[in-house]
Image: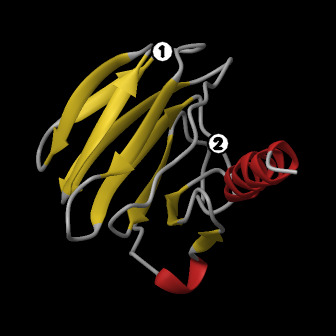
Amino acid sequence: MYFAYDPARGIQVDEPYRRVMVPYMMPDTASCPIDFSVHLTEWEPGGQVDEHCHEGAMEVMYCVSGHGTASVNGQAYDLTENSMIAAAPGERHCIKNTGDTPLRCLCIFSPPTTAEELRRRAQSAVDASQEGGR
């Protein structure tokens, strides 16, 4: 199988969790069954993801470029190029771009997720933040 970066497939996430997620290898794009999925997440400076967990999946986040902070179960880490964090099922985690350039991370899920599930979870977080701000 071959997969190419295609920004046209990017999933735009609104404030306060502004970022773009670009699916690479997912069950809904693969030509055969797969046991994991891969997408690229890009945050502009100041962008972040909400603190969350995946009850049924492990997520590994590999920093391709940029600088940020990451936490797994409340433990903070410097997230820099060629470093990564891993969150086992049920472990709370988050990432924030603390640098002045885009932060780009490859995110790998096992078992795999789909682009639609990424979109749904991100929108749920945005909706919850708006409800909490009322």
Q: What separation in Å lies between label 2 and label 1 (alpha carbons)? A: 15 Å
Q: Secondary structure at mark 1?
A: loop
Quarter of the image with the N terminus in it: bottom left
Q: Which residue is mark 2?
A: 113
Q: Residue 43 in the image: x percent, y percent? A: 40, 64
Q: Position of residue 121 (x, y in %)?
A: 74, 46
Q: Amino acid at mark 1?
A: Ala
- Residue drawn where x is 81% and y is 54% of the image: 130
Q: Is residue 19 above or below residue 98?
A: below
Question: Is the residue 36 above or below the residue 11 in the image?
Answer: above
- Which disc is residue 88 wearing? 1
Most distant residue in the front direction: 134
At horizontal 33% and vertical 34% (from top left) the residue drawn is 70
**Vertical position of residue 74 compared to residue 123: above or below:** above
On the image, the x and y values in percent for residue 21 come to 52, 63
**Occupied quadrant, residue 123:** bottom right
Q: Nearer the viewer, residue 134 or 70?
A: 134
- Tell me the residue at 40%/42% (across/down): 95
In this view, the residue in front, 114 or 61, is 61
